[in-house]
Image (cartoon, rainbow, N blue to C red):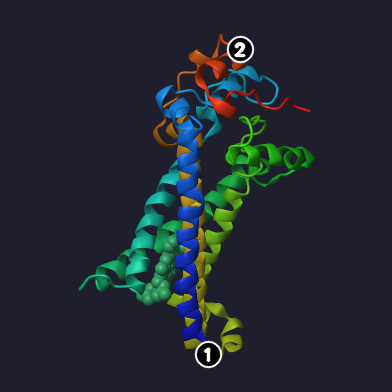
Amino acid sequence: MLETLNIWVDVVGFVVAAGMLFGFVIPHFIGSIVTGRVKKHFVDDYWDPLAHRMHDPNNYHYKQPIGPDFAPPVRVWHWINIVSFIILLVSGLYIRYPWFEGGREIMRMAHYFFMYVITINLIFRMVYLYIAGDWADYLKFDLDDIKQAPSIMKYYLFIGPPYEHRKKFNPLQRPTYPAIWALLGLQALTGFIIWNPAIGGPLTSLAGGPADLAAWMRLLHNVNMRILVLIGTIHSYLGIMEDYPVLNVFWFWKDPDMAKYEHDEHHHEEEAHGSGLDDERPAPVE
Ligand code: HEM
């Protein structure tokens, strides 16, 4: 049964990955070119999240630099996470599908080293969440979020204007972060049980012995790896396409030039820089 399941995971995983690429990333990229968003963002360098920040003193940090929104420990966490994730992904895929000769030792060593790095990093992130006390930015949802969700969906489907930026993260983006924490936690748990099935405790008898438990965990580790890659890809794609200046702050400590948004009324900028649907002003706050 495990053998059949493993084949299914490979087949379904491939179909889902191709579906994400051809069903979301590529059409969305073409849509962004056709509707003028790529030009607006990367040629004219006009970003609605920044404009909102400058013109919405109540909901967003008016005229504040973006830097203080991202504490240095979180930025360091994110870098360690990206590097470890990529190394774990490449080495893990090699362990499963050795695509060249003689790499087994080094790939296993890399996986066994970075599994500690990413796990300690995740524990650190949870401790820092507690220390910073900003859990609500990531975990709290209210009625306003539910009301706002359709306008965000419409924007991403190219059938609506840019949405309002009311909180640190929009309600469709916000669940991404706790989801990544939880999935990384599951990846660590399944990984450590593959490494030493004794950690599994009562799961061992449930699975029918340590070897079977490790085999089941390997299957879960593999499915979860695919989910993480899907979420990570969409997260990176949208981060670059829709929020590059903020990424620049978060990654490279480079604050954008906010002065250009200062004097113009928001809708003037939109008319001057946008095209098509993107010209419309955001829906008013209810
Ligand atoms: C979070 C901590 C992690 C731990 C503790 C961990 C642990 C392990 C262990 C012990 C193995 C078996 C290695 C062997 O057979 O010698 C493994 C395999 C693997 N890991 Fe990880 N890993 C972690 C994270 C990741 C991440 C982030 C990814 C990718 C996103 C990943 C992808 C894989 C893959 C694809 C395999 C091969 C599974 C198979 O043989 O079917 N791992 N991991």
Q: Is residue 73 visible?
A: no
Q: At which x and y percent is residue 128?
A: 56, 46
Q: At which x and y percent is residue 199?
A: 52, 77
Crowd class of label 2 (few under 14; some 14 to 19; many from 20; radius 10 Å): few
Whether ligand 1 has any atom under 8 Å from the Cβ at mark 2 is answered as no
Q: Is residue 159 visible?
A: yes
Q: Is residue 270 above or below residue 154?
A: above
Quadrant where ligand 1 appears? bottom left
Going 66% across and 29% down the picture, which residue do you hit? 164
Q: Is residue 58 above or below residue 5?
A: above
Nearer to the camera, 208 or 150: 150
The answer to whether marks 1 and 2 mark residues whose Cβ atoms lie closer than 8 Å is no
Task: Please identify the quadrant where the C terminus is shown.
Answer: top right
Identity of the residue furthest to the left in this view: 102
Q: At which x and y percent is residue 173?
A: 60, 44
Going 44% across and 27% down the picture, which residue do you hit? 39
Disc 2 residue type (three-letter): Glu
Disc on res. 27: none
Mark 1 or 2, nearer chain start: 1
Secondary structure of the residue carrying numbered label 2:
loop
Q: Quadrant of residue 267?
A: top right
Secondary structure of the residue carrying numbered label 1:
loop
For discs 1 and 2, the disc positioned in front in the rendered view: 2
Q: Is residue 263 above or below residue 15?
A: above
Q: Is residue 192 above or below residue 118?
A: below
Disc on res. 265: 2
Going 47% across and 79% down the picture, which residue do you hit? 6
Crowd class of label 1 (few under 14; some 14 to 19; many from 20; radius 10 Å): few
Going 39% across and 33% down the picture, which residue do you hit? 252
Disc 1 residue type (three-letter): Gly
- Name the residue carrying label 1: 209
